[in-house]
Amino acid sequence: MDKEFLNDTLLDDELLPDELFTSAVAQIRAKENTLLSDQDLENLMQCNSADECIQTLLDKGWGPTANNTPSELLKEEKERCWALIRSLCDENQMHYFDIFRYRRDYHNLKAAIKESYVQKDVPNIYLDDGVIPLETIKKCAADNDFSILSFPMMKAAQEARDILFHTGDSQTCDCIIDRAALLEMARLAKESGNTLLQEYVELKCASADINIAIRACRMGKDADFLQRALVECDSISVPRLISAACSGLDSIYEYLGTTAYFDAVPEIQKSPVAFDKWCDDRMMKLIQPQKYNAFTISPLAAYMLAKENEIKSVRIILSGKTNDLPDEKIRERLRVSYV
């Protein structure tokens, strides 16, 4: 693999004539009818067991897989979604979807550097379906040679590795790589010129900043740590968030009350899980209008995000049923559906 491949970026909208998307959008609109509705999720909630949920999902067109276990069913549904997107797009158009996959590469980069640090194989720490082959990332970390990667990834990897190997500070290592991932996504979204992709990344950056600020405040981290970890975005002022985080949780909540995330504050105060649900539900609201935008990549991206959201809700239900959680505990974590 060469740098040219790893440095590929999203193509500008002007390079992709509108007509290229009309057929794909027509097909994706038909597939939207197979997405689970809020009522479908409620029907799953009425099931008495995970096995009964799985049978209901099979009747709705999920699977089948070899054993129809929860993990296999969820994995298969995710793979089918990506296979559908690939079938509707040519190689150039698929660059648009790299923006949803780069965080997997950066996650794998973190994992590979840590695995190199402990000098042993650690099971179940890598994610599949990134842009860069996993073996390439693992070899870079093992050889301490990241030159084959794009410059932003190479720079972040080397800095994170040096800190981890010299200080053992895995938290700072994570922050450096996570921040680089978000910056890369923001760059790609801006280059795409696509509103939905830009809104998606904006929410990802802002929610990451908020979560980091909350955790850093609770752990007594200083402004230098926050400056290294946070990402500038349009809807959050990093200097003001840093100042608030250094003053206490109430100051963070007060600052967020002046932003577009004012109505998220009660959820943030509840738990990280509640805030994560708020973010997912907000994204579903943002993508709703895109199903009518027939001449861009947006309906395809919206479908993919909706499917990921659906899979997350099904995972929550299956896990809850498997572990005999009360229905109210499961229901409070369910995401709003796209349809």
Image (tube, rainbow, N blue to C red):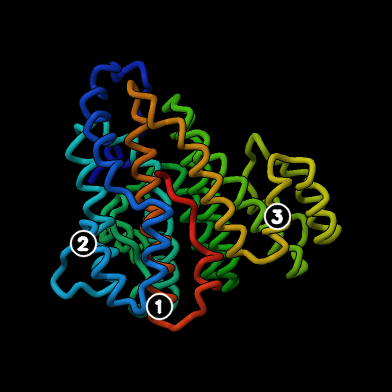
Find numbered disc 3 in the image and state the secondary structure of the residue it sits on. helix
Q: Which residue lies under the disc numbered 2?
A: 59
128 with respect to 205 (left or right):
left
- Position in image of residue 327 (x %, y %): 50, 74
Please tell me which of labels 2 and 1 falls first in the chain. Answer: 2
How far apart marks 2 and 3 lie (CA) works out to 49 Å
Q: What residue type is labelled 3?
A: Leu
- Which one is in front in this view, the residue at disc 2 or the one at disc 3? 2
Q: Residue 226 carries which label?
A: 3
Please tell me which of labels 1 and 3 falls first in the chain. Answer: 3
Q: Residue 321 carries which label?
A: 1
Find numbered disc 2 in the image and state the secondary structure of the residue it sits on. helix
Look at the image and tell me whether residue 8 can be seen. Answer: no
Please tell me which of labels 2 and 3 falls first in the chain. Answer: 2
Q: Residue 180 carries which label?
A: none
Which residue: 27% across, 70% down? 54
Q: Quadrant of residue 15?
A: top left
Tags 1 and 3 touching, CB below 8 Å: no
Position above or below: 43 against 154: below
Q: Which amino acid does label 1 sit on?
A: Lys
Position above or below: 164 against 19: below
